Amino acid sequence: MELPNHSELSPRLLGFLDHHFTPTLHHNLCSSSSVFSLSLPYNTACDLEANLSTECAQLDAHLQHLHQNLAKLIISWISRSISAKSTLHKLNLTTMSPYGIQNQKMLTQDLPQLAMELNRLENIRSYADTTLQLEAMVGDLEDAVLSVVNKKRGSVLAANCSNPSVSTDQGSREEKFFQAVRSMNCIEDLLVSPVKFRPQWCHLMKSVDSRVDKTLTLLRRQVLADHRALLSTLGWPPKVFTSKIESGKISILPNPLVLMQVDKQKAYSESFLELCALQHLQTRREKRQLGLLGKKKLNTGLWAIDELASPIASRSEYHFSKWVDQPEFIFALVSKITKDFIGGVDDVLQPLIDRAKLVSLSAKEAWISVMVQALSSFLAKRVFCVLVKRYKEKKEKSEMISSWLHLIDLMVNFDKQMMSLVSSEAYLFTEDSEMLEGWSRGLSVFSLFSDRPDWLKIWSKIELKVGRMKLKEESKHERAWLADTKKEIGSAVDTTTERFLLYTREDHKAPLIVESALKLAWEMIERCKTLPGILARAQFIRSTAAKLLLYLLKLLLLQYKGVEFLSTDCNDGSLLKLCAVINGARYCESKLQEWSDDVDFLEMRIAEIDKNISIKDDMNDNSLFFGEEIKSLADLETHLLMEIIADLLHQFETLTEEYVQNKDCFEQEEEDDGLHRASKVMDFSVSVDILEALDTLRSQLCIINASLNPKDFSDLWRSVADGLDRFIFGSIFTSDYRFSEKGTSQFGADMRALFVVFQPFCTKPEAFFPFVRNSLKLLEMDRRDLGHLNFCSVTHLSFDQAEKILRNRKF
């Protein structure tokens, strides 16, 4: 057999042959020749053949095994497929049958209906259970209340306390009363869940509330009757000797609460606690009922203290009616009663309130509140109604206004006295704004305006009218527009630095009328401080104090328009009046800024923003309460300052017209008496053509410095210096004037004289004349220094401007 060529074999086959035969052939070539060694390749080939035959047999057996497994798997899959198909067919037949349709309907319709029915039955069971419980509780309540009503409180003072039957009846009555209280508490506890989760039970709750309200009214009527009878036996209310009040000799009134004996004190304590328990229940019920409507219940005081104040108010009202034309006696009597009894009320009733566990309630504040409300009610019915009627009829209006303001002053003083008696701080840290408003409303006699906003509007109109009349009358006097200045006009100007921290009217050099207007406005603000409600106070202040300040602004404008301020004749009197107007506007602006930063005004402004009450002002900071007034005053101040600055510059320009047009003065080489006249002033040779302008400017700046407040004067003279700097540079250096050596020296002397005018106001006045200073610096340079000139050291001048100045310099 012929072997294949080596190059025709594949790489895989070559690798196989090399692996099995190459080492053997190499060994044969290197070994010695022998017959035994030649037989080695034959043996290797035989072994290889045997191995290959074995592997082929194994592979054939494995392939046959795979064929057998594949056949089994195919048979198994076919069997399962047939079984699944049969099952699906049976399921379809079952669904299409009548029994299958019924099962499907049960799953989709009957089960949800069954669940709904079960839920309905559970609701019925719960409703019936709750109804039975409420029926039992209401029945127990009615039985207990009926027992309390039938067993009236025995007169402990008249009965013999050692009698066992009296003590037994009294104990049985108290037991029945507290049983009724417990029943009402249980009813309220049971109604909590239906209110939140069963609103559809509204008819049940209305029915229960109707029966409980009737029972509670009956119980309250009986307890109040017993309490009033007990107070009568204690000698309450005490007698009030009004004749001593009219004569001014007021003695201390006796307090029966302090003079009670032990048995009386025990009976009163029990009656007080019963009233507190009933009020607590009533408050709880009203809170639940108002909660359904989304409302909150305000503070209403204590029933027990109302029972103390009610007979006193009824007895005092007879005396009040005699003092309608003398309201100071009314306030004196109420103040006397409140102060004399407040100590005993606090000592006797506060421990009982704590024992009743009434949180955030003070006997002292409740007593003050009920007395204030009694006075407020009488004033509204018998005093203010008459005054309002007279105001609308416009009869004897001046007398009515005087009576109204006198009454307001009495109310302000009375509120201050009542607030001085309040010591509790419980309401100062409360987060409930409505509770705080109700508390402040109860302690202020001005609460009568909360219910009558039309009366509040009348009050604001009266305050504004009277304030305007006073301010208008004062503005007619020349003294009202004068200001106390710390310097004499025309005196030598002090070179020390002015004090810029301005506080008082004297610091601002403001006229007296501004102080009067601010005083009137602040009095209006002070009068309404105890007015309940932040928005009501804000509305009153904007209708009175704010409008009065705008009227002051109008007076300042009229004063400004009445000044004959002509550019050609800026006299000293006109300057003084204008400075007074500017000082007044500045002082008023600073005070309004100070007021607006106060906490009370910040709260009022926040309340207005929360209620979307917009104020007409263009200020970016909308948080200022007096933002509109501050902006108007600042605009007036700026306008007047700019007018004074413009007139000073115009006057200087007029007086220096010949000076800036006389170019020969700057170009002359030698002195010429016909063209140049000089005068020795302050060691400077100043041109006569500019001397009058400098003297006039210095005189007017001295007058303004002595009359104007330091802050505005600082802005004024800096603006004047800047204007003069630009005027001189634009008039002289932009022209084609040629500067000789002598002309340069003369111009330098004139400008240094101008700097001296501003010397009293700063250390280096030339720093405020950058254009003139740098131009003069270029003119005074030697020819030798021009080669080393660094234009970076010449500020405020462009390269072209500096080049033009140097080009016009004659050497």
Image (spheres, rainbow, N blue to C red):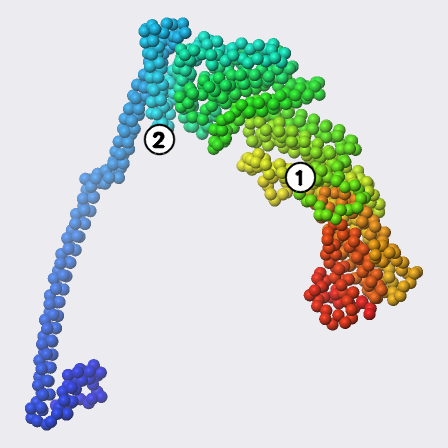
Quarter holding residue 204:
top left
The label shown at residue 277 is none
Mark 2 vs mark 1, CA separation in Å = 64 Å
Judging by the rendered image, the residue that carries numbered circle 1 is 503
Quick one: quadrant of the C terminus?
bottom right
Place of residue 76 in the rendered image (x, y in percent of width and height, measured from the top left): 13, 58
Q: Residue at x 21, y 38 (%)?
A: 102
Amino acid type at mark 1? Tyr
Residue ranking furthest to the bottom:
33
Q: Is residue 698 left or right of residue 267?
A: right
Which one is in front, 474 or 119? 474
**In the structure shown, which secondary structural element does the residue marked by tag 1 occupy?**
loop
Quarter holding residue 278:
top left
The 10 Å Cα crowd at callout 2, few under 14, some 14 to 19, many 20 or more, is few
Place of residue 795 in the rendered image (x, y in percent of width and height, measured from the top left): 70, 62
Q: Residue at x 82, y 52 (%)?
A: 694
In the rendered view, tell whether residue 317 sits above or below residue 69: above
Q: Is residue 445 left or right of residue 69?
A: right
Mark yes or no: residue 752 visible: yes
Mark yes or no: residue 616 visible: no
Which one is in front, 468 or 43? 468
Residue ranking furthest to the right:
674
In the rendered view, tell whether residue 380 sits above or below residue 777: above
Which one is in front, 557 or 42? 557
Quick one: quadrant of the N terminus?
bottom left
Judging by the rendered image, the residue that carries numbered circle 2 is 197
Q: Is residue 94 left or right of residue 178?
A: left
Place of residue 665 in the rendered image (x, y in percent of width and height, measured from the top left): 86, 61
Amino acid type at mark 2? Phe
Q: Residue at x 36, y 9 (%)?
A: 151
Q: Residue at x 22, y 88 (%)?
A: 7
Place of residue 486 in the rendered image (x, y in percent of width and height, measured from the top left): 75, 40
